[in-house]
Amino acid sequence: MLTIKGLTKRLKSGERELEILKPIDLTVPAGEVLAIMGPSGSGKSTLLGLLAGLDAPTAGSIQIDGVEITGLSEDQLALLRGQKIGIVFQSFNLIPNLTALENVALPLELLDQPEGAPARAKELLDAVGLGNRGHHYPVQLSGGEQQRVALARAFASRPSLLLADEPTGNLDTATGQAIIELLLQLNREQGTTLVLVTHDPELGALADRTVHLRDGVIVKEERRERVAK
Ligand code: ADP
Ligand code: MG
């Protein structure tokens, strides 16, 4: 369960102070599929960065499974991310001097699970359709392929919370659908809470709830009956 209260982000830009996120309240029950939609510049990526503990809020509280993350040290945050949170960034953030396979295996090695890491990394690459690309470096992969490696890496530690910024943004329709199916499978089989920033109406339509952001404020919320996924 993720609980956000009064979450605010302000940045100084010269003399002016920009309010990137106005105080936001949001509760995401465990196992929910939440889509965050909104125009470019509305604060979606900023919100995701705060939830991942990669950026500090100006004010407000973020609790993940009852733990207030806003006061944690860098080391504590790194441990929390390793154990609980999978992150897919808009810019993938793959490590350039590691192969696809090594990128996916890395979270497991950091969690002191090196024994099974290569086999599991291979399994995950197979699942995203890149089983034959394991030994390629990020620069040798297309944007869509890098995106799929980033997803495989985010799945590796079986996170209870997956944060993804435009996970289907760089993919053709067929690959995008395969990724959506994979995300929903993770949710179904492992109860992973999904917080997905998306412009993709198809992905939005599969979420249990869609929150619309505009100028740093939640302007609309839509809930859907859960259909068979
Ligand atoms: P979105 O992901 O919805 O497109 P962002 O969260 O990236 O939006 O950005 C929200 C707003 O905050 C935008 O107006 C953006 O220009 C501004 N912004 C984000 N990061 C910074 C920064 N480091 N410095 C100044 N402005 C920023
Ligand atoms: Mg963004």
Image (cartoon, rainbow, N blue to C red):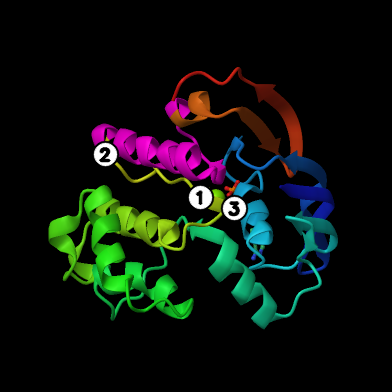
Q: Is residue 84 visible in the rendered structure shown here?
A: yes
Residue range corresponding to the magenta coloring: 173-202
Mark 1, residue position: 165
Which secondary structure, mark 1? strand
Q: Position of residue 116 (x, y in %)?
A: 32, 71
Which secondary structure, mark 3? helix
**From the Cβ of disc 1, is ligand 2 less than 8 Å away?**
yes
**From the Cβ of disc 3, is ligand 2 less than 8 Å away?**
yes
Residue 178 belongs to the span the image colors magenta: yes
Q: Residue at x 52, y 57 (%)?
A: 159
Mark 1 surroundings: few (<14), some (14-19) or many (≥20) residues within 10 A: many
Mark 2 surroundings: few (<14), some (14-19) or many (≥20) residues within 10 A: some
Instruction: Name which residue type carries label 2.
Output: Thr
Nearer to us of marks 3 and 2 is: 2
Q: Which mark is residue 175?
A: 2
Q: Position of residue 60 (x, y in %)?
A: 86, 57
Instruction: Tell me if residue 73 comes above or below residue 195 in the rendering.
Output: below
Q: Position of residue 219 (x, y in %)?
A: 75, 30
Instruction: Name which residue type carries label 1.
Output: Asp
Q: Position of residue 126 (x, y in %)?
A: 22, 53
Q: Main secondary structure of the magenta part?
A: helix
